[in-house]
Structure formats: structure tokens, C-alpha cells
Image: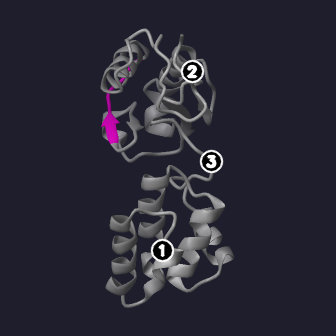
Amino acid sequence: MSEEAMTLFTPHLAARLDALVKKYPVKRSALVPMLLYAQDEVGYLSDAVIAEVAVRMGITELEVRNVATYYSMLRFKPVGKYNVQVCTNISCMLRGAYEVYERFQDELRIGHKGVTADGLFSLEEVECIGACCWAPAIQVNYAFHDELNPDSVPGILSGYRSKAGVPSDGSLSLGWQAGVSTPA
């Protein structure tokens, strides 16, 4: 891909994507990893991301979308800095996942696929995160939290608020998010 066309990704990611295509005997095999890396950097798979990945792969945008829509971990809309995924599959459900999910909804004041006003958290109910032995479990970005109950939720949220420099009550608006200003 020409240097002029590399407008969406950092030079480091662009080089990583180009290396992935060369790594696989069938270059199409690099598509899912490419989409995951692009999503990690951009935050979601925008139309522009899909178009650039298609060019890098030498396939059509429709082919990229056909693959991307199959996988639930690939997103087409922005999410919060911390994307909370609550597993409600059978093992988690039997051990209280819905109660945990409801507590997250109450604490964050958002529903499924919602994003908090400050952009710090998003919430979604997911089918399985592969942590059945430690049910109920959640995944926040790439971190797992397991053997939860509804009373675990405030502590988890408080920990992520601390990482982001937000008071545990969530009262500080984050100025880093586009369109969100800090209180005067």
C-alpha cells in the first residue's frame, strides 16, 4: 500500500498490518487479526477502516464486512474506554449473571450496547467469554473478572474509574473525550 494511503493508522500499526499479510500463506487468513488490531487502535470498525483494510488485503469492502459481521468481538460503533461485557451464557446465567448485568445497568445508568455520557464505560450482554468454570464472569477490554456477584460491581467500576483518574463516585467529566467538556 502506498504511503499516501496510510492515513488512518499509526505507522507502527500500518507496518504490523502489512507484515501480517505477508506472514500467512493465504493472505486472507490475516483478515481477522488485522481487524482486531485496527479496532484496538481506532476503537471500532468505521467505514474508512474497512475500506483501508480491504485495500491492504486486496479484497473488496464487502468481503471484509462479510467476515467482520460474523464475529461478535468486532464492533461497528464506538464503545467506552472500558467496554464491559457480561457473559449470560448457561453457566454464568445459572450462577447469577443476570443479576450482575442488572447491577451494571443500574450503576452505569445504561443498557445493552450503551455508552456512559462521559465515554468511560460501555456495557453489553454477550453470549460467552469462555470462563464457564469461574461463572459468572465479565470481560472489561481484555481483562477478565470472575466468580462475581452483584455486590462486586461497584468495586470493579471504582477500580476502572481510578485507572482513568475519575473519582469513585464518577462525578468528574472526562475532557479527553471529543465533545465532552469538563465542568466549569
Does residue 18 lie above or below 44 as drawn? below
For disc 3, the marked residue is 77
Q: State the residue in front, 180 or 105.
A: 180
Q: Cα distance, mark 1 to mark 2?
A: 34 Å
What is the quadrant of residue 113 in the picture? top right
Quadrant including the C terminus: top right
First in sequence: mark 3 vs mark 1:
1
Residue 85 in view here: no
Q: Residue furthest right?
A: 62
**Callout 2, which amino acid?**
Gln
What is the quadrant of residue 65 in the picture? bottom right
| Residue 131 drawn at (x, y percent) | 35, 42
User: Callout 2: few (<14), some (14-19), or many (20+) C-alpha neighbours within 10 Å?
Assistant: some
Side of 13 relative to 111 (left or right): left
Residue positioned 50% across, 18% down in the render? 173
For disc 1, the marked residue is 31
Magenta segment boundaries in residue numbering: 143-149
For disc 2, the marked residue is 105
